[in-house]
């Protein structure tokens, strides 16, 4: 098999995660025709089945993995560089927790400041390929600012539907990128529904999380990067902040792909970290697996959802990986923002720091026998930058020390 044989489009198929029906990409751009929005489509297989030389390419950032994406090779890519984010060996934080192999995958370093850029990049490539005139998304904030930024880089008009309560920085970001931003007087779920209706009505391309199958395709690249950055090995366990559950399923798919290709033996245990006030996936995992809507509230806006849009798939993926869910309080999340910043130099938004809060909860609940697991390779996925929500972070910050512009005043302040 040569590189030119890897043109995948003619054989590319999606399969409904609910009923199992297959669809060609042009048959259904989004969800299953039979099941509607809950029939989330997944690639029926990897576009490449033979482990050939040069599986990974020298394209920039996440496009290094373009041969493994269910996307036409000719789909135009947004020019902003997404992915290739660092994996930091967090030695100081690891030492304080008794975990010598603690790593942080810092996806806050994407161009618009969150992991959502991986999804936006692939969705925009698909939108451009099929000639979309405008792209749209409903978002708690990051998917919107991400789509707006990457769309700006390609000159594609964008419409963003956010709940009126979204953090200001995320709105300002989307507005300055030139998107039309609609502040929906309601919840994220209301924004989601309105975006579905608008795309249907106006023929816009819809990047809604879970509904658009290319979003999880983009997110899976973060798993490929972890694998390469760990010296071509999978971690043992990954902590993933979880709202809709798309990031989690993206990570699962990435590692599953590598397993299919014979590059790793097994998918790491995936731990879904949820906020106490937004714990539908955790409750489904603790119970029979069925999801019920809740009235979500959390300081971690990016993981606060009433109905997890990718809940069923995330529950499946956590179970298949042998992982579990942990639930953390808003106080624990804010404490984790502070600890992560002070111990690693990484300033994360609350949802992103939730992975550290989740690690604490996991260690506190760990049994004696799982104490061996302290030698495991642990990855915390940090999904968005703290600069997106300074107000939330400020809750954990002391006030600055007022001083006159004199050494004397400084000495007084220092109690010298
Ligand atoms: C979107 C987002 C999440 C949660 O991702 P889901 O796919 O909704 O589970 C976590 N952290 C940040 C910063 C996000 O933007
Ligand atoms: Zn279906």
Image: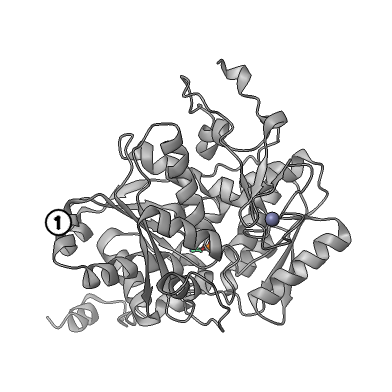
Tell me the element at label 1: helix
> Which quadrant of the rendered structure holds the C terminus?
bottom left
Horizontally, residue 229 falls left or right of residue 92, namely: right
Can residue 332 be seen here? The reply is yes
Measured as percent of width and height from the top left, residue 84 is found at 45, 41
Measured as percent of width and height from the top left, residue 367 is found at 18, 68
Read off the residue under disc 1: 372
Residue at 16% x, 58% y is 95
Does 90 sit above or below residue 351?
A: above
Does 390 sit above or below residue 380?
A: below
Report the colour scheme: one colour
The total number of labels drawn is 1
Rendered image quadrant of residue 166: bottom right
> Which quadrant of the rendered structure holds the N terminus?
top right
Q: Is mark 1 within 8 Å of ligand 1?
A: no
Measured as percent of width and height from the top left, residue 96 is found at 16, 63
Residue at 60% x, 70% y is 140
Rendered image quadrant of residue 341: bottom left
Residue 313 or residue 29, whichever sits in front: 313
Horizontally, residue 153 falls left or right of residue 83, namely: right
Residue at 30% x, 35% y is 231
Measured as percent of width and height from the top left, residue 89 is found at 26, 49
Does 314 sit above or below residue 87?
A: below
Q: Residues within 10 Å of mark 1 (few under 14, many from 20)?
A: few
Can residue 84 be seen here? The reply is no
Does 195 sit above or below residue 18?
A: below
Residue 386 or residue 192, whichever sits in front: 192
Residue 238 or residue 115, whichever sits in front: 238
């Amino acid at each position: 098999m040569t590189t030119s044989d890897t043109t995948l489009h003619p054989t590319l198929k999606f399969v409904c995660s609910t009923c199992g029906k297959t669809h060609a990409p042009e048959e259904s751009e989004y969800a299953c025709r039979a099941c509607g929005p809950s029939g989330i489509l997944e690639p029926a297989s990897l576009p490449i089945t033979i482990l050939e030389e040069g599986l990974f390419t020298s394209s920039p950032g996440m496009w290094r993995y373009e041969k493994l994406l269910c996307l036409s090779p000719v789909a135009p890519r947004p020019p902003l560089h997404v992915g290739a984010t660092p994996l930091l060996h967090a030695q100081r934080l690891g030492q304080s927790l008794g975990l010598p192999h603690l790593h942080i995958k810092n996806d806050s370093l994407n161009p618009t400041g969150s992991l959502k850029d991986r999804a936006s990049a692939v969705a925009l490539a698909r939108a451009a390929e099929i000639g979309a005139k405008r792209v749209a998304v409903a978002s708690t904030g990051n998917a919107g600012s991400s789509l707006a930024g990457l769309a700006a880089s390609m000159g594609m008009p964008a419409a963003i539907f956010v709940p009126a309560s979204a953090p200001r920085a995320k709105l300002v970001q989307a507005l300055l990128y030139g998107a039309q931003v609609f502040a929906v007087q309601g919840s994220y779920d209301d924004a989601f529904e309105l975006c579905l209706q608008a795309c249907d009505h106006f023929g816009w391309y819809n990047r809604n999380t879970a509904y658009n199958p290319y979003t999880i395709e983009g997110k899976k690249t973060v798993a490929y990067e972890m694998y390469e950055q760990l010296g071509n090995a999978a971690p043992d366990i990954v902590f993933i902040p979880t709202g809709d559950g798309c990031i989690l399923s993206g990570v699962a798919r990435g590692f599953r792909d590598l397993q299919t290709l014979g590059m790793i033996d097994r998918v790491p245990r995936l731990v879904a970290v949820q906020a106490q006030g937004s714990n539908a996936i955790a409750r489904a995992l603790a119970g029979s697996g069925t999801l019920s809507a809740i009235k979500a509230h959390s300081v971690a806006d990016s993981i606060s959802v009433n109905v997890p849009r990718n809940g069923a798939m995330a529950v499946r993926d956590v179970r298949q990986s042998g992982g579990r869910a942990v639930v953390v309080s808003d106080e624990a999340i804010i404490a984790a923002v502070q600890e992560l910043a002070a111990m690693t130099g990484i300033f994360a938004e609350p949802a992103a720091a939730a992975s550290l809060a989740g690690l604490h909860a996991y260690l506190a609940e760990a049994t004696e026998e799982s104490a061996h697991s302290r030698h495991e390779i642990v990855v915390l996925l940090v999904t968005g930058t703290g600069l997106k929500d300074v107000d939330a972070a400020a809750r954990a910050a002391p006030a600055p020390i007022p001083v006159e512009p004199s050494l004397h005043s400084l000495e007084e302040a220092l109690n010298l």
